[in-house]
């Protein structure tokens, strides 16, 4: 599963095991609760759930987007 973590300060692409939107929301909220600086969120998320972080590019089609500004998780339309 490919997920974009999109925020005001940075955007990241992470890759890991497939899960439901509900499970992804729980994973995100757990990582967020352990985060002091929002810019560290992708690294914390990857360490907690064995995801890999890739450099951001808009050319990758992702399964979900986590918007850290609004705390919304959605499937993008292509």
Image (cartoon, rainbow, N blue to C red):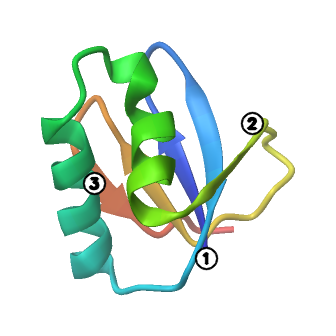
Q: Earlier in the sequence, mark 2 or mark 1?
A: 1
Out of 9 and 43, give the one closest to the viewer: 43
Q: At x 61% / y 38%, what residue is drawn?
A: 12
Q: State which quarter of the image contains the N terminus.
A: bottom right
Q: Secondary structure at mark 1?
A: loop
Q: Is residue 42 left or right of residue 15?
A: left
Rounded to the nearest angstrom, the CA distance separating label 2 from label 1 is 15 Å
Q: At x 50% / y 51%, what residue is drawn?
A: 46
Q: Secondary structure at mark 2?
A: loop
User: Would you name the residue on which mark 3 appears?
Assistant: 28
> Image height check: is 3 above or below 11?
below
User: Would you name the residue on which mark 2 appears?
Assistant: 56
Q: Looking at the picture, how far across and down is residue 17, in whole percent? A: 55, 81
Q: At x 30% / y 14%, what residue is drawn?
A: 37
Q: Looking at the picture, how far across and down is residue 4, in whole percent? A: 56, 50
Q: Secondary structure at mark 3?
A: helix
User: Would you name the residue on which mark 1 appears?
Assistant: 1
Please tell me in which quadrant of the rendered image residue 52 appears. bottom right
Q: State which quarter of the image contains the C terminus.
A: bottom right
Q: Is residue 12 left or right of residue 66?
A: right
Q: Is residue 35 left or right of residue 40?
A: left
Q: Earlier in the sequence, mark 2 or mark 3?
A: 3
Rounded to the nearest angstrom, the CA distance separating label 2 from label 3 is 18 Å
């Amino acid at each position: 599963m490919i997920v974009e973590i999109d925020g005001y300060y940075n955007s990241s692409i992470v890759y890991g095991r497939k899960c439901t939107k509900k499970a992804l929301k729980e994973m995100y909220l757990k990582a967020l609760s352990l985060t002091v600086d929002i810019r560290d969120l992708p690294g914390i998320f990857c360490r907690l759930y064995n995801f890999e972080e890739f450099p951001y590019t808009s050319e990758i089609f992702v399964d979900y987007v986590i918007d850290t500004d609004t705390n919304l998780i959605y499937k993008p339309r292509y």
